[in-house]
Amino acid sequence: MGGENAVNTATAQKPEGYRILNAEDLRHLIAHLPLARQLGGRPETWRIEEVGDGNLNLVFLVRGKGSSGFAVKQALPYVRLVGESWPLPLSRAHYEHSALTRQAKHVPKLVPKIHHYDEALALIVMELLEPHIIMRHGMMAGTLYPKFAEDISSFMAATLFHTSTLAMTAENFKSLMAHFAGNTALCNITEDLIFTEPYMVAENNRWTRPWLDGHAAKIRQDNDLKIAISRLKLKFMGSPQAMIHGDLHTGSVMLTSDDTRIIDPEFAFVGPMGFDVGAVIANLLLNYFSQIGHENKPGIRDDYRQWIVDTIEKVWTLFHRKFLDEWRTHGHGDGYPYKLFDNRHGTLALERERESYMGRLFRDTLGFAAAKMIRRIVGLAHNIDLEYIENPKIRATAEARSLMLARDLMVNTSDYRDITVVTAAARRINDTTPELTERNQRDED
Amino acid sequence: MGGENAVNTATAQKPEGYRILNAEDLRHLIAHLPLARQLGGRPETWRIEEVGDGNLNLVFLVRGKGSSGFAVKQALPYVRLVGESWPLPLSRAHYEHSALTRQAKHVPKLVPKIHHYDEALALIVMELLEPHIIMRHGMMAGTLYPKFAEDISSFMAATLFHTSTLAMTAENFKSLMAHFAGNTALCNITEDLIFTEPYMVAENNRWTRPWLDGHAAKIRQDNDLKIAISRLKLKFMGSPQAMIHGDLHTGSVMLTSDDTRIIDPEFAFVGPMGFDVGAVIANLLLNYFSQIGHENKPGIRDDYRQWIVDTIEKVWTLFHRKFLDEWRTHGHGDGYPYKLFDNRHGTLALERERESYMGRLFRDTLGFAAAKMIRRIVGLAHNIDLEYIENPKIRATAEARSLMLARDLMVNTSDYRDITVVTAAARRINDTTPELTERNQRDED
């Protein structure tokens, strides 16, 4: 990724009037906006802290009187994790705002409320979500989220269905597609870091060494896997099915036991639906395998593992049911025109085809889930579910198990006819002892 | 199609300064352009005639001294065939010019040379192609075109391959896609007239009555066919694989025995490759079945039929070979990244996958070919290969045979493993006597 084009784009898209804000700049900015009143008290009394722990942006929490407050996200003109050497266009704030606004139309209770958007500053002022925490952290602590499967399945069914040609006219759909086609730089990150680099020798790659050296090398030599990931990449680049979130992992979910919000859709574009559904399932599976590193004594998290397995199954079955319900009720788009099927036999035929459509979507989901798992283990960006396991051999064990499942999901996708086949495989693999490389290969030379 | 949106789009996109030209306006316009010199002589001596016989535009031939001349195409703000009640945006001239320019980069000898483009007037001044004739006319007369299969396969292999992610970066590809996403109105025509209306009761539909009444009714009740066409429609709307011509029938080909030019890409957009390849094969098949209506005595066109069959087979086999050659030589795009496969085993795996890719493209081709055949027989726009057959029963016989093959191609696509299976089926069906409706159904009531 990067390269000359990316640099030029980043520079070209830096709007007039952009500057990186610090806490005092932000205090001044908000003080002059109508929404200052919502904070109450004088601006000097507001508490402002920068808490961004993501890879890309600044995030400020602004607290006023009592429980009032905002979360403020500002895009930086480069990747925060890496620095100015890796430029990234500010326009991603534009696409994030645009996606949030569209999602809010369909699932207003499942996204943060937007209070203010400043295009020039690439800055979004949102509702402060408290006492919500990032789902990934909660799962590492073993917290149950009884509403999560219901909420995430509603989010996906509604946002994906209603931004597809099953619900939209071709004309409106194409203008949505053209709009998000500008979010190329963010798509490029996905194309490079998820669909390409983990499968070759690349500077960005890293993994738990020496333990996974053998697994990483096997991936780079596995032609069946490389063909499969390339097909998925082609699907990612060339299957505009719906406006997808584009980064729907458990770090993009903030929740309490009874409220769920999906944040951070800056990777949004019109792409394959299975990429979102797969992201959710992949991150649940990664956390499942990571539990070995988070339990104080073996087996103590078994109930939690069972909850994760149940949740994975519910995410798919509820999504499947809700998506079909949307289709049956609101299927008035240009895809599968309802006028062709408006008699009893037609309805039956269309219903069979809907199941077949969901079957194709399920296979896409599994392929993309696998891609998401592999990149978190041998690519650039890892996730803390695994990363925070201190004992490297235990971490590598969880990671190797994740890789085993992912490889099979991606190459033998059609063997997984049902979500329960996936969870059964996860359980089985979680009981195996994967081969690990005991010593750094180079030391043996 | 049409509807309120289409009207608004057409009105909104009518550029300042647009006016419909007559021959004298055009004479005046060209007289003030540098290219007037190419015509030679004084403007009053130029011979200008309007010859547009298509459905959408004005076409003028402008002849100067000796053999010098231009063909001038001007878009009208409505569908010429229907009139002002069916508005159509002038921007299609912009997309046509844009597609012609891009095609010229890859196959300069197979497209007309552009001399001048006037965006405001939606007008393109092109090379006058003489003594070329429209291929459809030549085939009705039984003329052999020995270079056609070579040329059309080169055109498709080069234009499709080089505008796909197999050759392009994802970034450039997405900007190409976004550019052509504006050509919605023309895509809508295809979506409605090819993928929807022929399969339902629709005002636009017409067919050879009463002879095809039974066939038309069967199509409207055929749920397997309606599911198949809906899948193809979804693919048309949501599979940006390459910049396609979008209307690649034998009326978009002008040729002599040794020179072939592809014209009229105003339906161009980034869509499924199989739509172009299928259009060529569909129109050859329709002409094959139409020969019964063009021969003076039975069997006299058998050699010509054989040439058509050979040509159909060569179109696919040559396209297949040339597309793969392009891929092997220039496959440096973001799709199937060559870096993943740059060793002997990788090369072998990628080569297998290329064949598999071509297999998928072949199935798309057959599905789209079938869609193109059916719409020409029971939809709005027919083609003269069949339309010019005066005896309606003979015409209906040719049409019913076309429908029989098309139905099977679309529903049982994967049974056709090879282009020779398609041509064998065409021959077999051409020997059958299809059932025809002898009397207008309503008369019998």
Image (cartoon, coloured by chain):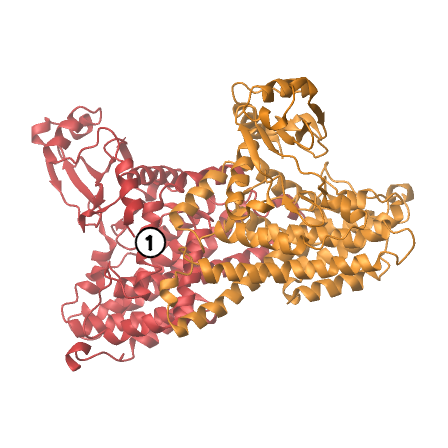
Chain colours: A red, B orange
Q: Left or right of A351: which side holds A40?
A: left
Label 1 sits on residue: A190
Give me the chain letter of mark 1.
Answer: A
Image x and y of residue B99, in percent: 53, 40
Q: Residues within 10 Å of mark 1 (few under 14, many from 20)?
A: many
In this view, B253 is above or below A314: above
In this view, A96 is above or below A445: above
Name which residue lies at 29% across and 79% down.
A432
In this view, B331 is above or below B71: below
Q: Nearer the viewer, residue B42 or A366?
A: B42
Can you tell which quarter of the image residue A312 is in?
A: bottom left
Q: Left or right of A276: which side holds A324?
A: right
Name which residue lies at 66% across and 45% down.
B194
Image x and y of residue A144, in percent: 26, 59
- Is residue A169 visible in the rendered structure shown here? no
Q: Nearer the viewer, residue B299 or A383?
A: B299
Image x and y of residue A400, in percent: 27, 73
Give the structural element (helix, strand or loop) at label 1.
helix
From the image, which quarter does the N terminus of chain B lie in? top right
Q: Residue furthest left?
A: A44
From the image, which quarter does the C terminus of chain B lie in? top right
Q: Left or right of A264: which side holds A391?
A: left
Q: Left or right of A250: which side holds B350?
A: right
* Total marks placed: 1
Q: Nearer the viewer, residue A98 or B401?
A: B401
